[in-house]
Amino acid sequence: MTTYDHNDDTQTTTDSTAAAISGEAVTMPMQLAPPSAGIDSAERQGNAVEPESLPKVFNLEELQVYYGSHHAVRDVSMAVCANQITAFIGPSGCGKTTVLRCFNRMNDLIAGARVEGLLAYHGVDLYSAEVNPVEVRRRIGMVFQKPNPFPKSIYENVAYGPRIAGIKKKSELDDIVERSLVQAALWEEVKNRLKASALGMSGGQQQRLCIARAVAVSPEVILMDEPCSALDPIATSRIEDLMLELKSEFTIVIVTHNMQQAARVSDVTAFYSTEVNPDGDLRTGLLVEMAPTVDIFSNPSDELTEQYISGRFG
Amino acid sequence: MSATIPARSTQTGPDMQEALRGGTLSGGRKAKNHVASGLMVLAFLAAAIPLVVMGASVVSQGYRAVLSGSWWTQPIPETGRSDLANNQNLSDLGFGTPSDAGASSSVVLGMAPAIVGTLLTVLGAAALAIPLGIMGAVYLHEYGKNNWLAKFIRFMADVMTGVPSVVMGVFIYTIWVLPRGVDGKSAWAAALALACLMLPIVVRSTEEMLRLVPDNLREASAALGTHTWKTTVKVVLPAAIAGITSGSLLAVARAAGETAPVVFVIGFVTTVNASFSGANTTLSAQIYGQQQAGGVLAQDLAWGAALTLVIIVLALTLIARRISRRFELS
Ligand SMILES: Nc1ncnc2c1ncn2[C@@H]1O[C@H](COP(=O)(O)OP(=O)(O)OP(=O)(O)O)[C@@H](O)[C@H]1O
Ligand SMILES: [Mg+2]
């Protein structure tokens, strides 16, 4: 077991990812960086790129989510590609948050939540028995709808994840905190009050702090659930700019209710909707269509999508 | 639009002052308001009377003993024994007249053994019950949630809270004191009984405090790849520490005042025994024992012990408040 070498050239990405997220490996997430080296920067610009040409980070097949007996989302099949921003849009209650929280197994925290079907991350089924959800969440970070900084100092908020991952050296933590705050476009505003409580910041600053906190553990993917819904237009546009910058390094999946936001930032858009169950009044969400954002907004192939985008439904 | 409410929109200066003072309320409503306020003040006074009377009598009867220089350092005078106090004339014993018995110079008033015993038993009980109670609450709220075991423990804790404290004393007497015979009675046995009493209080109050910690903090921590136990230690407990501390200290204060579970299992001494083993005594046991003994000196000792206990409990309560306020500020 001790002779097992994770850097062995003969190993495939899939193997090492599987070993790592099942908790066997002590490698840092950084070392599991996505195989993005082959994509040149022109392709990363996004919108014009055919998604099929990019490496797939997530692959979903017939994903079903239940809350107790409520079939909340059914038959979601899609692929999320590396270094793209994928937006989830759709009417309230159609399961956007639910699907997003499957990606890093946050639904495990909800009693009664159950997932069926395939959700593969670099080819590893995240819901197979050997996978350790804690390892999954180290690689797939999340930013929540409501800013939720810890009631600690700004510094401690950002240093929290790296500390949990085992980094103890002060100088190393200082570097990570600075780099993360710079990436989150917050450094200039807070560099002189890193010891101040994070709760004393404005909502927009708090949300950027949460992004810095997520970025600090060097995840491969960042999931964002309506990250701007509590923010004013200026803070929103800052975070949108931020997402476009972060996308060169991270794969981003964002839920939004703001059609313009989806159009502005995302490369690919997935439109969800609901259908009324024949047996009972609870609704089940489903993926209606997923396509490059330009196509979704210029000529959606589904009538529902067209109605939703033009504001006639939802 | 303003034409429909001219009377109000044109109010200025003194008119507006009058309006804001409520001068425009009708007489009937004003009267009702006064009656209701009056009743509430009366209710408050009625509630305060027993408190004030009790406080005043404890202080007035106990202050001489407590202020005597020897009280906090000297052994308990042997008069606590009923054979001494009950059957003899106090003046024969050299106590002076009953009215100044406490101030009598021929008897050294002391309560040090009971003060030491109280601190010892309460500390022991706190050391047992608080960590266990907090861990139990963490299990209930962070792990067990609504599974059958958590529900069962919660139910048992509720039942235990309602059990009369004397039952805890009998319980410890049976399982701890009896098997050890004469050596069984000790501060440790009393600490065990008080810990049984405190445990359910600590569990339930801590669980309430954990419930107040917003779930989004737990989610934020989990989303960074943190195990539940680490989230609990690094985020949840620090966020709830103020409430947990004050809840625990209130349980301690309550245990400090308990008599029934203690008198069964602590034995009797009149000299300081600063160890968990061997017979000991506490303030509450002294209040009970001296009061039973009868006689003026014994009464003075009982009142003095009562005031001392009130002071200790008050100090604990103030510390609890201080701590929770400090945590709230930071
Ligand atoms: N914790 C939960 N327990 C039980 N049911 C839930 C839970 N969370 C969501 N649901 C149900 O799942 C369905 C989808 O909810 P979800 O929150 O994913 O919708 P959404 O698309 O994110 O909506 P919104 O745009 O309003 O945020 C809803 O019917 C909701 O009632
Ligand atoms: Mg949602």
Image (cartoon, coloured by chain):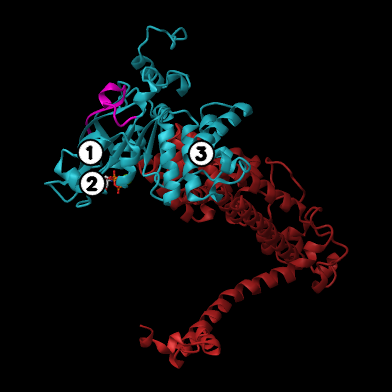
Q: Tell me: B141 left or right of B282.
A: left
Residue A305, given in percent of the width and then of the height, sits at 19, 43
Of A202 and A217, the residue lying toward us? A202
Sequence-wise first label, 1 or 2:
1
Q: Residue furthest bottom?
A: B27
Can you see residue B169? Answer: no
Can you see residue A162? Answer: yes
Q: Which residue lies furthest to the right in this view?
A: B105
Marker disc for residue A309: 2
Residue at (54%, 26%) from the top-left corner?
Answer: A166
Sequence-wise first label, 2 or 3:
3
Rendered colour, chain B: red
Q: Is mark 1 on a helix, strand or loop?
A: helix
Which residue was labeled with disc 3?
A185
Q: Is residue A82 above or below residue B71?
A: above
Marker disc for residue A296: 1
Hey, which quadrant is residue A304 in on the image?
top left
Quadrant placement of the N terminus of chain B: bottom left
Q: Is mark 2 within 8 Å of ligand 1?
A: no
The answer to the question of whether label 1 and label 2 lie on touching residues, with beta carbons closer than 8 A, is yes
Q: Bounds of the magenta span?
A: A46-65
Q: How far is the residue under mark 1 from the one under mark 2?
A: 9 Å
| Chain identity for the colour cyan used in the image | A
Residue A51, given in percent of the width and then of the height, sits at 27, 26
Of A129 and B7, the residue lying toward us? B7
Q: What element carries label 2?
A: helix
* Number of residues whose C-alpha sits closer than 10 Å to that of mark 2, classed few (under 14), some (14–19) or many (20 or more): many
- The amino acid on which the numbered mark 2 sits, given as a three-letter code, is Ile
